[in-house]
Amino acid sequence: MYERDPLSRVLYIDLTHKKYWVEDRRDLFEEYLGGTGVATQLLKEELPRNADPLGPENVIVFAVGPFNAVYPTASKTVAMYRSPHTGNIGESHAGGRSAVAIRLAGYGAIVIKGASDLPVWVAVHGPKVYFRDARALWGMTSSFTVGRIIRENEPGSGFRTIMRIGRAGERMVTYASVITETYRHFGRLGLGAVFGSKKLKALVVSGRHTIPVADRRGYKRVYDKIYKLIVDSPLMKKYHELGTPVNVLRLNELGALPAYNFQKTRLETADKISGEYLAERYLGRRVSCAHCPVACIHVAALREPYVDEPYFYKTTFIGYDYEPIYALGSNLGARDPEGMLRLIDVVDRYGLDAMTTGVVLAWATEAYKRGIIDDADLAGVKLEWGDYDAYIKAVEYIVEQPTELYKAMARGVKAAAEKFGGEEFAMSFAGNEPAGYHTGPGAHFNYAFGARHSHLDMAGYSFDEKTVGKEVTPEELVERLVAEEQWRQILSSLVVCFFARGVYKPEIVSEALRPLGYELSPDELHELGRRIYEEKYRLKLELGFKPEEVKFPKRIFETPTPHGRITPEYMEEAKRIFIERYVKPLLGDGKDVEGN
């Protein structure tokens, strides 16, 4: 590492005592690069293994890496904490300006400890940290309004990031999100609830630090090479033109688009929620994360007339991606694109994870139609597929929790199904709800055993799509997916957006590190990725994850995929191979997978 790079500086913030300090953790950044690698080590150091996810002893780690603010599309920040949704490792990545802001403030990581006695927002402006009274913001329904007020009261415009929660985080819904720069999110696994438990309404970061490089001429050469690969790449072009919603029609045609709570894999009205349809009729603008030339963030302009006011309209700008379209669209039987956009907007304003919210609503709709839950449970809301007025009201109740059903739904589909029934159609993998891919066994193995139960851990959906029509043994499936997850630990330690994974291959990464003072060959990078993966999974096991107890939802065996019907025997064999080859070696001391 170049000796003047401030990446190794870690800012510690103690909310309980309203104090802060900085430590140089060159040891961690030299060994683990940054991002996921460093965040794992900091969480291991700071988090008691018996910590209540919603107690003051839980810890939040934000970490960036050596590529942030240095190379294009290296735009993500890693957040790591104990998830209140699964009780295990919570890891979420967000774009926007957060990564660049943290680096320009002069830090490689921020560790937040303790809990405030009253609502605060914390402002980090370079070397100074301020604890602001946020009592006037606490209770505000909209995270967007909170962001606007903070923008008017903090310096650093153009360089800062504002990470904040909505009402869902305050109410500690276990899948509440943290919103940053309005259209980006730390979405999965309940970081917003952890903020809420700490009375932390927002975190603002800004700075104007200079980031040095060891070899300027070499850096410029590699930068230009990477930039050209990104802007000329056909893969990146699709993200710019239609964004991830390009997946809707493709997956629908393939028979892999979840619809009606995964009862079907094709939606008869998919064309009305497709990327093409939304772009033609609603696209208002495209937005980029900081230091990214792609502009994959697509924002709809929804124009709605005021009641009894001719020629007067309200225009709402709503960010949309494939995952919200799946979860709040196809999986709810969407027929009305405007209703879907309104629901996405409400979910964002409350600060909820769109994927989990959609899966919870889909379960509740099916449960209601089967008579498992009734009008009283739903506080009078009559759920029907595609009825967006009902879904919007249900989201409000998930946040405010007026009945026992909504209290359970605020903890996810697993909690709701365990309490009220309907477990046979509850889509939950080790406590987390799935992404929008019913592509085959790879996707579902990925949801079950990825370190954070995210489709982006192993890209199992992608492996499925590439192997349609081919016979893949459980052994090959496990080997290929774990190898992919191990390499992605490098990308998330640098920290690179996974959309650019086709550009940042091992040889390019090795070459790009050299001008920054790192000498790591492609083979050494692969070995480091394996070590980071093992360190993270070992912590996951220490926090109580029991892979042998993971059960696959029954519905994945009922609904055909592009690979045909998945069998329980296939998935159980993949599970057995994974435990034998990748879990047991982490335990050591002759222990079995149960720790005996």
Image (cartoon, rainbow, N blue to C red):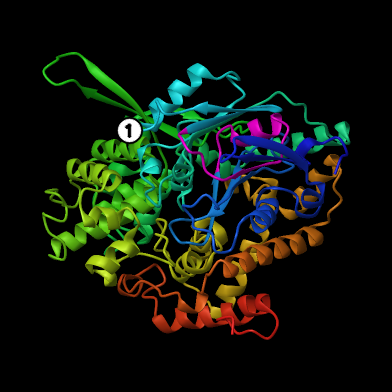
From this view, report whether residue 538 is shown above or below residue 507. below
Residue drawn where x is 45% and y is 71% of the image: 441
Residue 477 percent location from the top left of the image:
55, 73
Q: Name the foreground residue: 10 vs 222.
A: 10
Residue 110 part of the magenta segment: yes
Q: At which x and y percent is residue 145?
A: 39, 25
Which quarter of the rendering shows the C terminus?
bottom right
Q: Is residue 289 left or right of residue 555?
A: right
Q: Nearer the viewer, residue 570 or 582?
A: 582
- Identify the residue at image location x=46%, y=39%: 199
Can the viewer see residue 471 in this picture?
no
Give the quadrant of residue 582. bottom right
User: Which image quadrant for residue 559?
Assistant: bottom left
The residue where tag 1 is placed is: 141
- Magenta residues span 94-119
Q: Quadrant of the N terminus?
A: top right
Q: Nearer the viewer, residue 581 or 270?
A: 581
**Residue drawn where x is 85% and y is 47% of the image:** 518
Q: Is residue 469 visible?
A: yes
Q: Three-letter amino acid code at disc 1?
A: Thr
Report crowding for label 1: few under 14, some 14 to 19, many 20 or more residues within 10 A (C-alpha).
Answer: many
